[in-house]
Amino acid sequence: MVVYSPHKVILFGEHAVVYGYPALSATVDLFAKIYLVPSRSGLQYTPFVQKTLSYLGLSNVYVKVETNVPSGSGLGTSSMIITSILLSERDYTKEKLANEAFNIEYETQGLGSPIDTTTIAAGGFVLTNGKEGVPLWKIEKNGISWNFSSVPTRNTEMVIVYSGSKGSTKEQVAKVRKFYERGKFAKDIMNRIGSITEDGVKAVMKGDAANIGELMNENHSELKVFGISTDQIERIVSVGREYGYGAKLTGAGGGGAVVIIPREKEKLIKKLKEMNVMVFDTSTTSAGIFKRSE
């Protein structure tokens, strides 16, 4: 059984979503092919893969992942692989798959939100703790609730850029948590990001690329306060703003990827390639994870 899983981006609300604020995410047309193959040693070097195999009671297998997207890029790799391993061995409803995969990811990292596993399971644009869209399901953990809905809209063209360095979700979420626990300042930023997200959802539903980009720029500026951007990310964002409607880091930060809403796409891609970074010319997709026999 082979599983095909889309990667995902967060357009608005990363980090804030961990504390129950709104966020908007979407699957993108960059798919990985994932399957299990026999292995004498069964060695897996990533904790979340080991945890998932143990949960299923599997040994002497190796998880093979075929994708052009580097791990640690902020595009949901760990969630994608966890959901794929589960789905390859069992049949799930989308809700149960998202929930079980999140539980495994949370146990491995000790923090986070179910936005990635839900987005990958559901496909398309997914709004967390917002007012728009068609209700999907609810997930709770440690007193925080995440209510998910599917946002019906056209696919959005985007350019995703890998900065060349991996970001650690665990480290970056822990860094932001330190800010958050200090008091009102961080909470004010989270409130602002939540408001940006709500405006962003309306812009996405209207297909207003200019407004989407402007709000992405605002969201990125708020995230920078937490120290999760890098010099390379800022260089990419600068190019993205010059030839696109807007640009921001996506995911936990500290490395990883930047998402850009293109305006002059040929010039944008040419300039980015001159920086020797990995560029993906793609769009959102309505598809979520699926499996089939091959």
Image (spheres, helix red, strand yellow):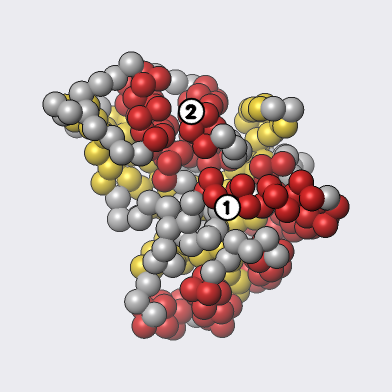
- Is residue 254 in view? yes
Instruction: Give, as a three-letter code, the residue at label 2.
Output: Ile
In the picture, measured across the screen, residue 294 lies left or right of residue 163, that is left
Q: Position of residue 74 (x, y in %)?
A: 48, 53
Q: Toward the viewer: 60 or 37?
A: 60
Q: Secondary structure at mark 2?
A: helix
Q: Secondary structure at mark 1?
A: helix
Count of number-bearing discs:
2
From this view, report whether residue 252 is shown above or below residue 293. below
Circle 2 sits on which residue?
A: 104
Label 2 near label 1: C-beta < 8 Å?
no
Q: Position of residue 56 (x, y in %)?
A: 36, 18
Q: Which residue is at the far top? A: 57
Circle 1 sits on which residue?
A: 172
From this view, report whether residue 268 is shown above or below residue 256. below
Question: Mark 1 or mark 2, which has the lower sequence index?
Answer: 2
Q: Toward the viewer: 71 or 11?
A: 71
Q: CA gap, disc 1 to disc 2?
A: 19 Å
Instruction: Give, as a three-letter code, the residue at label 1.
Output: Gln
> For the residue carrying disc 2, how many other residues have a C-alpha within 10 Å: few (<14), some (14-19), or many (20+)?
some
In the picture, measured across the screen, residue 243 lies left or right of residue 293, that is right
